[in-house]
Amino acid sequence: TRARMCTGPRIAFTGRPIELAFHPKDRVFAVLNKPNVFLATASGVIEGTAVPLGSGVTAGSRGLVWTPDGNRLIASTERGHLQTFDYQ
């Protein structure tokens, strides 16, 4: 069998994505960027959703996960920090 890669829509934003996590209930996903976390859909970035990581903290190469109920997003950042975000 042959594997095929299909191209889909592209989302433009400033920065470098490190991790992304799909919301368990809504059609959004969170993107962990070097200095912040923001939300997006297949149509693009949702304006006004970018939230900076803590003072002096950058994402590095860590992780991002939604709680099972989708009410909170947890980002693991450099130096072992966890930062939580409420989803509204």
Image (cartoon, rainbow, N blue to C red):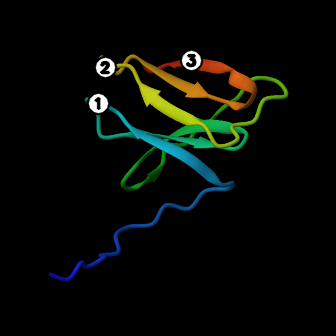
* Residue 85 higher or lower than 27, as above or below: above
Task: Kindly report the distance in space between the C-alpha atoms of the residues bearing marks 3 and 2.
Answer: 14 Å
Quadrant containing the N terminus is bottom left
Kind of residue sitting beneath label 1: Pro
Secondary structure of the residue carrying tag 3 is strand
x and y percentages locating residue 64 in the rendered image: 51, 33
Residue at 29% from the left image edge and 30% from the top image edge: 24
Query: How many numbered circles does the render carry?
Result: 3
Q: Earlier in the sequence, mark 3 or mark 1?
A: 1
Q: Earlier in the sequence, mark 1 or mark 2?
A: 1
x and y percentages locating residue 73 in the rendered image: 48, 23
Quadrant containing the C terminus is top left
Residue at 72% from the left image edge and 31% from the top image edge: 78
Q: Residue furthest front?
A: 1
Q: Earlier in the sequence, mark 3 or mark 2?
A: 2
Q: Which residue is mark 1?
A: 24
Kind of residue sitting beneath label 2: Pro
Q: Residues within 10 Å of mark 2 (few under 14, many from 20)?
A: few
Q: Nearer the viewer, residue 46 or 19?
A: 19
Kind of residue sitting beneath label 3: Thr
Mark linked to residue 84 = 3
Q: Nearer the viewer, residue 59 or 42?
A: 59
Mark linked to residue 68 = 2
